[in-house]
Image (cartoon, grey):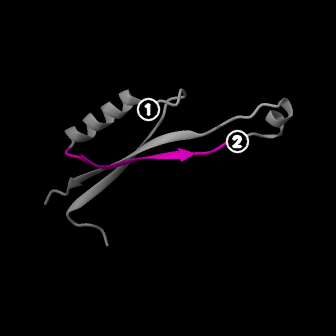
Amino acid sequence: MPNSEYEYKTVVINDLITGEIDSEKLQKTLESYALNGWRLHSVFTNEVGRNSGGSFTSFQGVSINAAIDQTILIFERRIKV
């Protein structure tokens, strides 16, 4: 049963290729949602993928760590009645 008082939005921000959080994108996202009446409800990180490599990379003796970190933001706002 949906909550009749609040609505929620989930936004995923991938880290930069350097492994650092994309703080510019994070800041712009927070400001944009705040301007539209949303407030940040929850935030967490998620690591996607781990040590992937195929026969070609194994043949070359190179191991690739393909882990990608994501920051997941959950926004909430009261439904206008």
Q: Nearer the viewer, residue 67 or 28?
A: 67
**Residue at the far left in the pictured view:** 81
Count of numbered labels shown in the rendering: 2
- The N terminus, quarter of image: bottom left
Residue at the (53%, 45%) spot, across then down:
47
Q: Amino acid at mark 1?
A: Ile
Q: List x then y, in percent, for residue 59.
A: 86, 34
* 38, above or below 63, in the image: below
Q: List x then y, in percent, for residue 22.
A: 42, 30
Q: Secondary structure at mark 2?
A: loop
Q: Amino acid at mark 2?
A: Ser
Residue at the (33%, 51%) spot, across then down:
9
Dominant SS of magenta comes to strand
Distance between the Cα atoms at labels 1 and 2? 22 Å
* 35, above or below 46, in the image: above
Q: Residue 39 lies in magenta, yes or no?
A: yes
Q: Secondary structure at mark 1?
A: loop
**Residue at the far bottom in the pictured view:** 1
Return the residue at label 2.
52
Residue at the (70%, 34%) spot, across then down:
64
Instruction: Give the magenta-colored segment's residue range.
Output: 37-51
Return the residue at label 1.
21
Q: Which of the labelled discs sits on residue 62, or is there none?
A: none
Q: Residue 27 lies in magenta, yes or no?
A: no
* 57, above or below 49, in the image: above
Q: List x then y, in percent, for residue 6.
A: 23, 60
Looking at marks 1 and 2 on the same chain, the residue that comes earlier in the sequence is marked by: 1
